[in-house]
Amino acid sequence: MRRAIYPGSFDPVTNGHLDVVDRARKLFDEVIVAVAHNDQKQPLFTLDERLELLQATIGGLERVRIAPLEGLLVKFALEQQAIAVVRGLRAVSDFEFEFQMALMNRKLEGAVETIFLMPKEEYTYLSSRIVKEIARLGGDIAKFVPPSVVEAFNRKRTS
């Protein structure tokens, strides 16, 4: 079985993330969407909330599994018997960081390849950070995220 890991913080999951998952499903037998905790980011949604939002949006897709990610990505990939890590590239600005990470992961574990996928053009400008900023300023995020994410933002505003 050709299995891939698609890691990210997914805070929140966007339509761009969903597009990359869909593209990865065409290339691999199974895609594990691995939700990471990033110490360098202050998440809006807890890890459990992000896992629930992903479950609500893509949990029913065939050949897709959602899992929390702790520790080294390449170690997780080996534990899951994955042959590849999938990373989305929106723009040239993403490439330098992603390239460095891919090279480091290769140094740590050469058996796990990194595959870069570009989202549809309509999602190249989209990021979780931008979605959070639009929502914080009272803008409509409905065309950028799944409905369950819009509902989650609305619940956060009223609580």
Image (cartoon, rainbow, N blue to C red):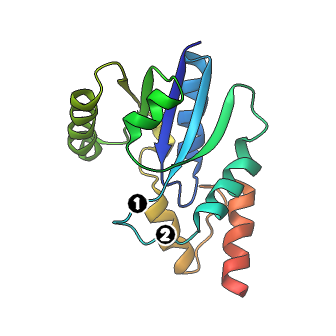
Badge 1 density bin: few <14, some 14–19, many ≥20, Cα 10 Å: few
Secondary element at tag 2: loop
Q: Tell me: 23 left or right of 61.
A: left
Mark 1 or mark 2: whose residue is earlier in sequence: 1
Please tell me how many numbered marks the rendered image carries.
Answer: 2
Q: Tell me: 156 left or right of 97.
A: right
Residue 47 vertical placement versus 138 (above, below):
above
For this orientation, the residue located farthest to the top is 1
Residue 29 vertical placement versus 146 (above, below):
above
Q: Position of residue 42 (x, y in %)?
A: 43, 72
Secondary element at tag 1: loop
Report, in whole angstroms, how far the alpha carbon at label 1 lies from the one at label 2.
8 Å
Can residue 88 be seen?
Answer: no
Do residues under tags 1 and 2 come within 8 Å of each other at their CB atoms?
yes
Q: Position of residue 19 (x, y in %)?
A: 57, 36
Residue at position x 50%, y 32% from top?
5
Residue 38 marker: 1
The residue beneath circle 2 is 43
